[in-house]
Amino acid sequence: MISIGANGFQLLINYIVAIIVAIGVALLLRLPLLPEKPIRFSWTTSALFPTPIFAIGILAIFYSLKIFWIQEGLVLAIIVGLASAIFVKYGFDYIFPRPPQNEDGGAF
Amino acid sequence: MNIIIGIILAAIISWINFVAVDTFLGLPEAPGVKGAENVGYSIKNRKGDLAGGFFQGNILCSPDASAGTLIAAIGVYALGIQGGLIAALLVYIGNRLCADPGYAGTCGALTMTALIFIFSFIGILPEMFICGMVIAIFTIQGIHHPTSSRLLGKIAKSFGRYTKYE
């Protein structure tokens, strides 16, 4: 079995909190819940994708570096969830701009 | 678990994971980037299947569930479950850098992290998944492109994701 740390259950709670905070704040910032259709080929950033991916990914980097801060990492989870929602809303298109598109949707 | 049996089981699990996620998320339907289109038509010219060719081109040109599966296995090996979640984030960033809208890589990394965790209870270790995934990708990309593209085309048809390109 893979070790998930001494306080594995607490970490699981923290990840779930980070996901919920990220989706909630993203919706408050008026990001759409789902990308526009067709979802499989959509460039739209939305509350369900990629906001929680950023939240749990960045939180996992903190936990891998043994940074938990207070409340066994719960406060950190809330802050990371908040920050990732704000990043996806305001900073995402600046860091990862869309490539120029041709008329059938493929990138060149 | 015996390491040879573990690697064979891990290869089968990895193969099913990445082919199912990639097919479901539409890799055989359309080339996401220009290189995938070239690969697809090249394989078709060698008597392969166009949808399977797009699938192979897409996993060659940008990180999709195949890369996600491999990087998640490496991440879990290096850092535990945390590593799988970091892998998902890195694959997503990699997708954006490759100008691919990209859902398959991230979803594949997350499903693989869950699968590695579940199968660790019966003794399949993350390093077996790394080796197994290399074998799984070799069966698709490394032996005979037209044959594997025809298999991928059949799988795409059964998922209702066959390409509309000619």
Image: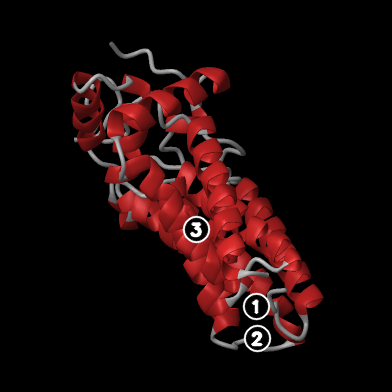
Hey, what amino acid is under mark 2?
Phe
Q: Quadrant of residue A22?
A: bottom right
Q: Quadrant of residue B99?
A: top left
> Is B142 positioned to the left or the right of A22 in the image?
left
User: What chain letter is assigned to the residue under label 3?
Assistant: B
Hey, what amino acid is under mark 1?
Leu
Quadrant of the frame with the N terminus of chain B: bottom right
Residue B132 numbered tag: 3
Residue at 31% in and 14% down: B165
Residue to which mark 2 is pinned:
A68
Which residue is at the front of the view, A98 or B99?
B99
Which residue is at the front of the view, B29 or B12?
B12
Residue B15 image position (x, y, % from top left)? 52, 45
Callout 1 touching callout 2 (CB < 8 Å)? yes
Mark 1 vs mark 3, CA separation in Å: 36 Å
As displayed, is residue A55 above or below residue B18?
Answer: below
As displayed, is residue A95 above or below residue B100?
Answer: below
How many residues crowd mark 1 within 10 Å: few (<14), some (14–19), many (20+)?
A: many
Dot 1: element: helix
Using the rendered image, report if marks 1 and 2 lie on a common chain.
yes
Residue at 18% in and 27% down: B42
Mark 1 or 2: the one toward you: 2
Residue A45 image position (x, y, % from top left)? 48, 43
Using the rendered image, report if marks 2 and 3 lie on a common chain.
no
Residue to which mark 1 is pinned:
A76
Dot 2: element: loop
